[in-house]
Amino acid sequence: MAVDWLGFGYAAAVVLGGFMGYKRKGRSLASLIAGLFFGTISAYGAFKVSTDPHDIWTSLAASGALALVMGLRYKNSGKLMPAGIMTGLSLLMVVRLLIF
């Protein structure tokens, strides 16, 4: 059984991003909640991929939804941090899940 380290790392990055948004945006509770929500789902998805490498659907849904939401935010704001970074990470995660 191989551990999905990339999946768990992605989940940690999502949680950390939500916490940073909370601290940097003057206690933005929405950033914190979204980071915890998507990070938890991503960690659960990484756990499922670790137990069954073909069970990618939870991770794919979480990273796909985050890529879409953050991609729209990046398109509207043009800011690389955090929207552009999270869009890129999420798209890389989607590609990784679909290829492997």
Image (spheres, helix red, strand yellow):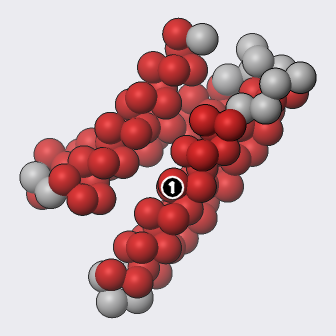
Binning the other alpha carbons within 10 Å of mark 1 as few (below 14), some (14 to 19) or many (20 upward) gives many
Residue at 53%, 10% in the rendered image:
99
Residue furthest out toward the bottom: 26
Residue at 59%, 64% in the rendered image:
36
**Percent coordinates x, y for residue 54 in the rendering:** 75, 14
Which quadrant of the rendered structure holds the C terminus?
top right
Residue corresponding to mark 1: 14
Q: Tell me if 18 is positioned left or right of 88 in this view.
A: right
**Percent coordinates x, y for residue 14 in the rendering:** 51, 55
**Percent coordinates x, y for residue 10 in the rendering:** 55, 44
Residue at 33%, 42% in the rendered image:
87
Number of numbered discs: 1
Q: Can residue 73 be spotted in the picture?
A: no
Amino acid type for the residue under numbered disc 1? Val
Q: Is residue 80 above or below residue 1?
A: below
Which quadrant of the rendered structure holds the N terminus?
top right
Indicate the quadrant where residue 25 lies.
bottom left
**Percent coordinates x, y for residue 57 in the rendering:** 66, 26
Q: Is residue 92 above or below residue 12?
A: above
Q: Can residue 89 be spotted in the picture?
A: yes
Q: Tell me if 59 is positioned left or right of 23 in this view.
A: right
Residue furthest out toward the top: 99
- What is the secondary structure assignment of the residue under circle 1? helix
